[in-house]
Amino acid sequence: MDIGWLESFLALAEHESFTRAAAAQHISQPAFSRRIRALELWFGEALVDRSTFPVALTPAGAKVRASAIRTVAGLGAIREELRGRHRTPRGAVRVAVAQTLATTFFPAWWACCGDQRPVPCSLLPANTLHGYDMLVHGSCDLMLAYADPVGPPVFPDTELEWLVVGRDRLAPYSSVTAGHADFALPGTASNPVPVVTHGSGAFLGQVTDRLLSGHDLHLSPIVQSELTSALAALVQAGLGIGWLPEDLASPGVAAGMLREVGGPSLSAELEIRLFRVRRQRMPRHVATVWHRAAGLVAGAS
């Protein structure tokens, strides 16, 4: 067994595509496919249904995935400890959070979740699906994630409960030159608008797809990435329009470098939700944050 096989398998489960998962791991697709095949031979079972697109896990693959998340996380923690780089504060609350929220919403919100002093925290980067897996399998205590209040539910309510701790808005933005937006919607068939996009597996990409489904826009994808901060930088550099969270785009807007384009129907209101496993007894330090967050919500309403 090679730990790299498990890491590649988890990447495939996340990206639902051999091509995208191989690219995310910076290895060739043939080498990536050999890793998945080696893992299947080790288990003696097919873990991936290759007849579907996007790629789906078999029942055996779903079981392996749940165990692989715990194994990779556990071995990673032990490795860091043995190498002397383990600096997690005592009694830290483990919070899985998307990169965008970690740099925009989280710092000020977390500062309000303590009393006289900040609550110790271990901040774990994770997209929405990975964060959900970490939460239900005990690899983190809480998850902070975007939610689309008018879209289909992402998680079963029977497993998780949540608080709405903040709000944001997803909208299309363009770079600005001499006080004018560089790009405008809807574009034409002969002159489509360049656009930088989230991957279809990214949560904000799914919200964007929902918004685009009701419009006749002419777009030409230029760059695709699940790193929203990278997309914001690309929009600001003038590569094209991108759908960005308002909190992330607001500094560029204030500096006159970004401008929202398109009407209200091309934007979506987002909720920022704090998730925990339903009916699970929380350690004292985790309960402190949850109840403090609930109090902040009640005080704001």
Image: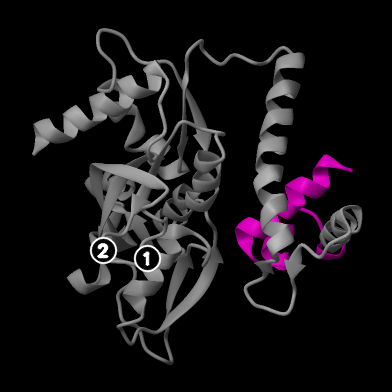
Disc 2 secondary structure class: strand
Tell me the kind of residue under disc 2: Ala
Closest to the observer, 171 or 276: 276
Task: Give above or below for 237 relative to 144.
Answer: below
Query: Residue 71, image x and y in percent?
Result: 72, 36
Disc 1 secondary structure class: helix
Q: Residue at x 34, y 23 (%)?
A: 287
Q: Residue at x 64, y 77 (%)?
A: 53
Q: Mark 1 points at which residue?
A: 207
Tell me the kind of residue under disc 1: Val
* Residue 84 at least partly seen: yes
Q: What stretch is highlighted in magenta?
A: 1-30
Closest to the observer, 107 or 181: 107
**Would residue 185 be found to the left or right of residue 8 on screen?**
left
Which quadrant is the C terminus positioned in? top left
In contact (CB < 8 Å): disc 2 and disc 1: yes
Q: In the image, which disc is placed on residue 153?
A: none
Task: Give above or below for 48 relative to 130.
Answer: below
**Would residue 197 be found to the left or right of residue 164 on screen?**
right
**Dot 1: within a 10 Å radius of its alpha carbon, few (fewer than 14), some, or many (20 or more) residues?**
many
Overall secondary structure of the magenta section: helix
Query: Residue 191, image x and y in percent?
Result: 42, 86
Q: Name the residue under label 2.
A: 268
* Residue 24 at least partly seen: no
